[in-house]
Amino acid sequence: MKELKYLENPKFIGVKVHPDYHGYHVSSPYAWDFLHQVAEQTDLMLFHVSCMPGTGFADAEDIARFGSEHPDTNIIMAHMAGIFQNGVYPYFPNFQGLEKVSKYTSSCNNIYIDTAHQLMYVYPGVMEKMIELVGVDHIVFGTDCPLQGGMQMKFAIEIIENLEIPAEDKEKIFSYNAQKLIKKIKSLVSR
């Protein structure tokens, strides 16, 4: 596959995978094989995870399973691993994806979940539930700015700052976990 040639450049440090926009299911045989080839050649993959009912091209559990098969590739699962507003009970977010991912984060140190999701500040308790399910060592701060505007970042920061968790855990979410990834990336780029 000619696209894999790009990964030969030592300054190419990661890949964003967005199946919902590109129109393929992440676990289809062709995509699965291609993504495995990408993971063998890069140390960082950011996956858009389906977070709207009916857009099930990037299932959280499929991506977590993929990450477990590539322990040397860091996997970031965007949008809180795809939590979404429950269509039947619209006042409650659906944590099914995070619950499935938690089976993998307990044994895989390379799987991270980012906080880029508006449900984080729409519903009380979303961050607490995320921490309970996957643990602070697997959460990286992320936003969809500028897509959703600067207020989204402000609200996201306030939610995390107001969590009743130790300051060290907040630091892990805000910066330490991402710094671990960045240090690894910097060492790759400086080769």
Image (cartoon, rainbow, N blue to C red):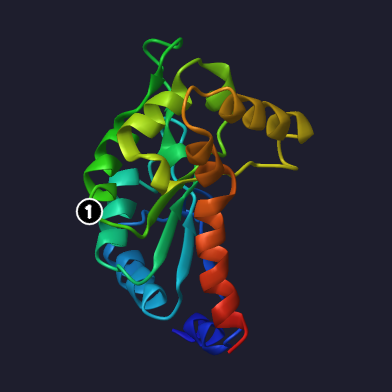
Residue 146 location in percent, x, y? 75, 43
- The front one of 172 and 122 is 172
Asked where in the image residue 84 lies, by quadrant, the reply is: top left
Instruction: Tell me which residue sits at (48%, 22%) in the image.
Output: 164
Residue in the picture at 40% in, 47% down: 137
The residue positioned 57% from the left and 18% from the top of the image is 122
Locate residue 21, reporting x and y percent: 54, 51
Across and down, in percent, residue 175 comes to: 59, 50
Quarter of the image that includes the C terminus: bottom right
Instruction: Pinpoint residue 10: horizontal percent, then vertical percent.
Output: 57, 87
What amino acid is labelled 1 in the image? Ser
Image quarter (top left, top right, bottom left or bottom right) of the N terminus: bottom left
Q: Is residue 44 above or below residue 80?
A: below
Q: How many marks overall?
A: 1
The residue wearing badge 1 is 107
Mark 1 surroundings: few (<14), some (14-19) or many (≥20) residues within 10 A: few
Is 12 above or below relative to 157?
A: below
